[in-house]
Image: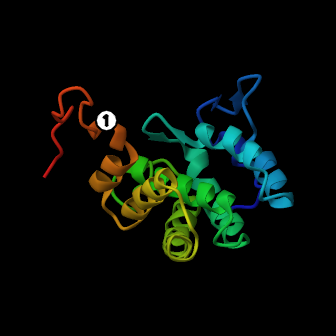
Amino acid sequence: MISLDDPRWPALDHRGWSEGRGAPDAPFVPDELRQLRADPTDGGRFSDLWPYLCSEGTAWPAAYAAVPHLVTLARGLPAAESERDDYLYVIGLVALCSGELGEVPGDLPDDIADAYRQALPEALSLLAETLATAEHDQMSTRYLLAAMAALKGHPDYAEILNELDIYAECQSCGEPMLELPE
């Protein structure tokens, strides 16, 4: 994984960061990861950061560099810790938004792409442990199962689980709002 001091971080775009410059409120990812290393249970900080890495169906280059760090953060937390769930879900979301498992943008540096791909199996193991040992409400279970599907290489199933409300039945008529893919 690339160091948090690596000079390439400014070149790794995210939702609020492009061509080495960010919007006034945009986070600088390595600084945020440094803060999360100091306190991995800072759910508010992570909640503020992750949509800049992966959202709206897009995983930005900074997400791929961040994933190995997120795996390290998740590894350091007990399986029952809700922040661990959040890290693992976002890793799965990056995988989901990337298409095929391990797929990365063509212009991503090889070492960052390799570190991302090497982090995925450990994320899957941590996720399996988390699902097996911790209690989760229905919503958390749904999102963790979506992450699991993505990390197993099933992006279509991951998408269905992630967007399950879209596939819910109409409460007034009982008809499916959308047809589920086969």
Label 1: element kind: helix
Amino acid type of disc 1?
A: Ile
User: In this view of the protein, which residue sits in the foreground, 175 or 106?
Assistant: 175
Residue that carries the numbered disc 1 in the rendered image: 166
User: In this view of the protein, which residue sits in the foreground, 138 or 23?
Assistant: 138
> Label 1 crowding class (10 Å Cα cut-off): few <14, some 14-19, many 20+?
some
User: In this view of the protein, which residue sits in the foreground, 132 or 26?
Assistant: 132
On the image, the x and y values in percent for residue 169 come to 24, 36
Residue furthest to the front in view is 172
Report if residue 90 is visible in the image.
yes
On the image, the x and y values in percent for residue 25 come to 75, 25
Residue 70 left/right relative to 34: left
On the image, the x and y values in percent for residue 16 come to 64, 29
Tell me if residue 108 comes above or below residue 76 in the rendering. above
On the image, the x and y values in percent for residue 182 come to 13, 52
Residue at the image position 18 percent from the left and 28 percent from the top: 173
For the N terminus, the image quarter is: bottom right
User: In this view of the protein, which residue sits in the foreground, 170 or 65?
Assistant: 170
Residue at the image position 84 percent from the left and 51 percent from the top: 35
Residue 147 left/right relative to 109: left
Residue at the image position 78 percent from the left and 59 percent from the top: 40
Residue at the image position 46 percent from the left and 54 percent from the top: 138
Q: How is the image coloured?
A: rainbow
Tell me if residue 50 comes above or below residue 15 in the rendering. below
Residue furthest to the top in view is 24
Tell me if residue 167 comes above or below residue 172 in the rendering. below
Tell me if residue 126 comes above or below residue 172 in the rendering. below
